[in-house]
Image (cartoon, rainbow, N blue to C red):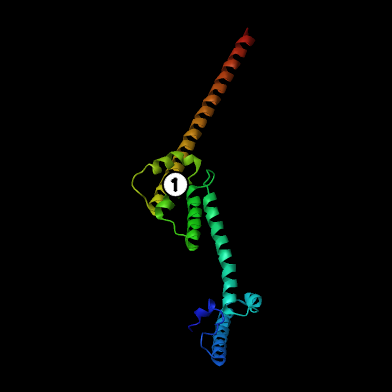
Amino acid sequence: MNLARFLTETVPQPAEGETDAQSLSAVEAWKHSDFICRGSVLNGLSDALYNVYYNIKTSKDLWESLDKKYKTEDAGTKKFVVAHFLDFKMVDNKTVMNQVQELQIILHDIHAEGMVLSETFQVVAMIEKLPPAWLDFKNYLKHKRKEMTIEELVIRLRIEEDNRVAQKGTILQAAAKANMVEVGESSKGKKGKGKKDNKGKAKVNNL
């Protein structure tokens, strides 16, 4: 509709040499186009917002009011998302892969807000946020010379976590077997001691 200029323009001032009739005609033409532009903007608002903004008289004032409101809100959203990313730290009492997924959602929100982070930055950040129990593996990843993609890092983390779970299961099984052997030997010792005591009592009685 070629009306975008009315979002930034104000009522035209009479040009040098213009007659009053020409000036009045230009102002009326501007007001008509501005009215159409303002109506188009208002038509795109929800009913609740329309009721707030319909009293604003010109397209420029209407646009600036909306721009100020939503740019401020957008800046607030960006600050919140960035703060969430900076505060995020992985912990030992949750699986690493679940926490990786949480971090990837935050990174997606950052991209959705128009803030582009390089893949190298994302990889390094994810490594730095690994939990304390993963310190050795974190140092191993940090000293690798070849750069990794996010996908490659996630695969490495999944393999490492699977290995840790398997190793933990093996240790628990070994501990359980050791406990069973210890309990069995203890029971045998008690039985043997009972028999010896009974025999000793019988000898005493016989005497």
Q: Position of residue 194 (x, y in %)?
A: 59, 20
Q: Quadrant of residue 117?
A: bottom left
From the viewer's side, name the closer residue of 59 and 112.
59
Q: Residue at x 62, y 13 (%)?
A: 201
Q: Give the quarter of the image for residue 196.
A: top right
Kindly identify the residue that appears in the image at 57 percent across and 77 percent down: 60
Give the residue at mark 1. 127
Q: Residue at x 60, y 10 (%)?
A: 203
Q: Position of residue 72 (x, y in %)?
A: 58, 64
User: What is the residue that sits farthest to the front in this orientation?
Assistant: 17
Callout 1: helix, strand or loop?
A: helix
- Regarding residue 169, the answer to whether it shows in the image is no
Check the picture and name the quadrant holding the C terminus. top right
The picture places residue 181, in percent across and down from the top left corner, at 50, 29
Can the viewer see residue 53 in this picture? yes
Q: Nearer the viewer, residue 80 or 16?
A: 16
Where is residue 33 drawn, in percent x and y?
54, 85
Against 185, residue 118 (above or below) is below
**What type is the residue that disc 1 sits on?**
Ile
- How many marks overall? 1
Extreme residue in the top direction: 207
Q: Which residue is at the far bottom?
A: 21
Which residue occupies the foreground of this view, 204 or 44?
Answer: 44
User: Which residue does the image show at 60% across and 76% down from the upper left?
Assistant: 46
Neighbour tally class for label 1: few under 14, some 14-19, many 20 plus, Cα within 10 Å: some
- Residue 38 sits above or below residue 22 on the image: above
